[in-house]
Amino acid sequence: MAAQEPEWWNDLQIHGFLSQGYVDSSDNSFYGDSEQGSFDFREIGLNASFRFSPRWLVSAQLLSRKAGEMSEGGLNLDYGLVDLTVLSDEYRRVGLVAGRFKNPIGLYNDTRDVPFTRPSVFLPQSVYWDKLRDIMLSNDGAQLYGEFYRGRHGLSLQLGVGNPPIDDNLEWAYLGYDWPGSVESDSPGFVGRALYELDDGRLRLALSGITTTMAYRPAEVDPLVAGSIDIDYFVGSFQYNGENWSLTAEYMQEPVRWSGFEDVVRDRRNTADGAYLQGTYRPLPDWELLLRYDAAFHDKTDRDGERQGDEKGLPAHLFYSHTWTFGLTWSPNEHIMLRGQYDRVDGTAFLSNEENPNPFATVRNWYMFSLLLSVGF
């Protein structure tokens, strides 16, 4: 007689994934020394959830991510939270999560590290900058959520408060160098998203944003004095899903204010922005084609980068990028996926300063080819 599984076993869910990527670029470095061909792109995740009761859920994910010089592949808590459902019926669900939660920014941010949920090897850098990944990725705090349904219509609302984990990538991105001191989250910030869906996701419209303040704490011997960086990040999203095709567009705007740094890092205000338009088509159930154009600008009032280049004595192409992306995905079953991606790029705005420390060595017009093999369970 076969042994019966305990009742709690059905309330426990365990999943995971493993991805290995390869990146080859004509010039510049992206996810490692890609000019020579780089295998420094790897994702390993293991997640589990347990439902104690209809109202209480605990879930967490451990993630190891190697991304060239931007991430060394150590084991980190991607998210870990307690979810309390306060109210639930056929028309609505309202609840609260506490712990480390993924930030609901745009359409892809809260699942960006799961390869099967991305549309391509790399997300469009005009909205989902990998060099700014950590400030967008998650918060340590609490989040209220509500899901409301009426006939063909659905509305999801999320509002959270917390502090994001900070790493050296943000220091490179916002201060241009790895200074002797450290960048820390100065005070709790806010994150929120309103997402409307028609016909179970055939049409999706969303507005989302995050606001946070980072503080620089100088070392005992440090040319940079204490200062703060106020960051707002807003995204508007559109998606239409047909039977075997989809069309997606998102626009990002990021006002940033530097203050207190005196002469080394000039106090200033600046608004970056970016957008992309993406189409996918599935000619066969196992195959998907992708075409995307995206553009990113460090300053929305200086699209060609000439003014910023003149002010800083740097090449203008550092401050913008225009990218055409062609992608192909093969998914023979729900557990295996192979992706290829070709990017033709004008500009280098989305490149990491940490991986490309000499701005004069970067090349304006370049291309990149990438492969990603993913296995999930």
Image (spheres, rainbow, N blue to C red):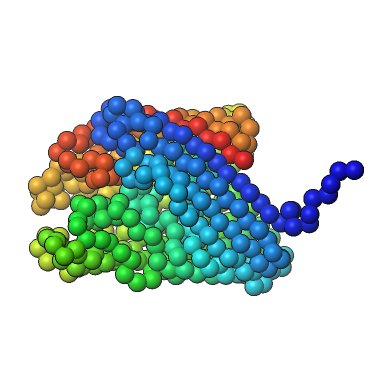
Q: Residue at x 71, y 66 (%)?
A: 53
**x, y percentage for residue 353?**
24, 45
State how many labels appear. 0
- Drawn side of residue 41 relative to residue 119, left or right: left
On the rendered structure, is 222 left or right of 291? Answer: left
In the depicted view, which residue is nearer to us: 167 or 303? 167
Quarter containing the N terminus: top right
Q: Nearer the viewer, residue 329 or 360?
A: 360
Q: Look at the picture and state if 120 lies above or below 296.
A: above
Q: Quadrant of residue 223?
A: bottom left
Quadrant of the drawing holding the C terminus: top right
In this view of the protein, can residue 291 be seen by the observer? no
Percent x, y of residue 142: 50, 69
Vertical placement of residue 70 versus 227, above or below: above
* Direction from residue 166 to residue 181 in the image, left or right: left
- Rendering coords of residue 105 (x, y %): 45, 57
Q: Looking at this view, is 316 or 85 the one in front?
A: 85
Q: Quadrant of residue 35?
A: top left
